[in-house]
Image: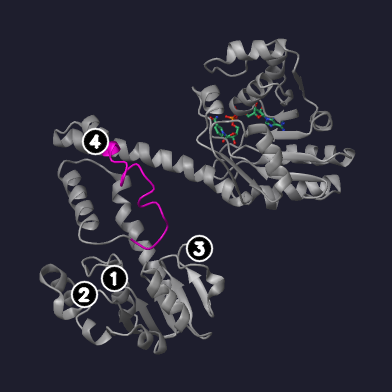
Amino acid sequence: MNISIFGLGYVGAVSLACLARDGHRVVGVDVDAGKLELIASGRTPVVEEGMVELMSEVVRSGRVSVTQNAVAAVLESDISLVCVGTPSAPNGSQDQSAMVRLCHDLGAAMRQKSRPHVFVFRSTLVPGTVEDVLRPIIEAESGKKDGEHFHVCYQPEFLREGSSIKDYDKPPYTIVGANSPEAVAVLRQLFGHLPCELHATSVRSAEMVKYCCNNFHALKITFANETARLCGAMGVDPFEVMNLVCQDRQLNISPAYLKPGFAFGGSCLPKDLRATLYMAKQRDVDLPMHNGIIPSNRLHVERAVDMVLATGKRHVGLIGLSFKTGTDDLRESPMVTLAEQLIGKGLSLLVYDPDVHLSRLLGANKRFIEMHVPHIGSLLRAELASVVCDSYVLIAATTDKEALAQVRRLAQPHHRVIDLAHVPAAPDWPCEVQGLCW
Ligand SMILES: NC(=O)c1ccc[n+]([C@@H]2O[C@H](COP(=O)([O-])OP(=O)(O)OC[C@H]3O[C@@H](n4cnc5c(N)ncnc54)[C@H](O)[C@@H]3O)[C@@H](O)[C@H]2O)c1
């Protein structure tokens, strides 16, 4: 393929070398003449394992050229990978000025080009940038339309400095955010040989995945480091602890607990987190990330309260009360906190939870609900139909698929459903459904 690459920093230079190695003709574009000179003479503009040999080899092959002329590069290629820098502005926002300037040139090139072209944005970009900022610039400058005369798409880059050639050859996956099958097909041609899955998704999701992955990496490092600080203060070996934590592939290093939903609660997580924070406080160890967990969890409950209040309706049915569907454990259930807050706001609440029978509650579980919602007995109904019938707002807080299907069957157009548990397919509902997480 004939490929143009814009921005010859870490991402662009490594991509240029690897694509040329794989037999493609690649033209590299940068505003920095020094980088272009280095590449033209077979040298690498970035220090990376294997790049010295690879750059010299691909430049000798004659498949690599460089230019400062963006328009010419688009005209002589079929696909452009855009890898220019998107650094932080002083206020923390993303500085997209290089990207925006470049897109004016890309659009000007498209005005002159009669053949179709695929623009693949690979720089990290705030969700919405490709569709709302960059595409309109290219369309305005070219007088042509995305999806007809050219295709824009977004493919996040996952390589890491220090191991970028290895990461290029073995990425965790290829994600293509595109609105047209043509763009996906071209990228499949280019990257389909890599030993990983290719996932096609929306442009915005692809943009967000990149942020989410980097934030998750930062979170993991911080978690390990905060744990190590606490371990140090407690005389525990943090390497041994983290090594064992990572051995659990069922609950720890796994998709478990990574699905958006309602707040956490129950008899263990809140109490153990509080104890951890207390251990740290006693030893003068600061754990800001751990400290932020409970306030963040509380915000999730507050958001649910705000959503109910925003409906303006006063008769509310809560479907699911225990902290986990299928149990009757009410201790620190976020649904109990939600119920308490809604009652406190003067709303009229009914509750349905087939697993919660007051007469069978014992010990700490019984004491908890008696302390937080003393008149729970008058709110609990044995029949789901009676809760639905006497409520305007229905809070779907159970993950029981059968109960949710029953709510959907019973709901009428006047109902408003607030989904805390990701109910299936909102369009099937006869009434408005709002999700806490969507
Ligand atoms: N560095 C990484 O490990 C990495 C990994 C994944 C994603 N990313 C993302 O990829 C993007 C590029 O990162 P990088 O580290 O390669 O950046 P970099 O700063 O090393 O390189 C960016 C290059 O873009 C060039 N440039 C600026 N304006 C230009 C223009 N109008 N036309 C052509 N070239 C222009 C600059 O001169 C520079 O050489 C960023 O959005 C970054 O967040 C980086």
| Residue name at image x 72 percent, y 12 percent | 61
Could you tell me residue 270's position as x and y percent? 24, 57
Residue hosting label 2: 372
Q: Is residue 91 visible?
A: no
Question: Residue 438 got which mark?
Answer: 3
Residue 50 at what x, y percent from top left? 55, 15
Q: Which residue is mark 1?
A: 337
Element assignment for label 1: helix
Tag 1: residue type? Thr
Quarter, ligand 1: top right
- How many marks on residues? 4
Crowding near the residue tagged with mark 1, few <14, some 14–19, many ≥20 C-alpha atoms within 10 Å: many
Numbered circle sitting on residue 244:
4
Identify the mark nearer the N-term, 1 or 4: 4
Q: For the residues marked 4 and 2, what is the alpha-carbon distance in whole angstroms?
A: 37 Å
Crowd class of label 2 (few under 14; some 14 to 19; many from 20; radius 10 Å) = some
How far separated are the C-alphas under marks 1 and 3? 22 Å
What type is the residue that disc 4 sits on?
Leu
Tell me if label 1 and label 2 are in contact, CB under 8 Å.
yes
Alpha-carbon neighbours of circle 4 within 10 Å: few (<14), some, or many (≥20)? few
Quarter of the image for the N terminus: give it.
top right
Image-based side of 87 in relation to 220, left or right: right
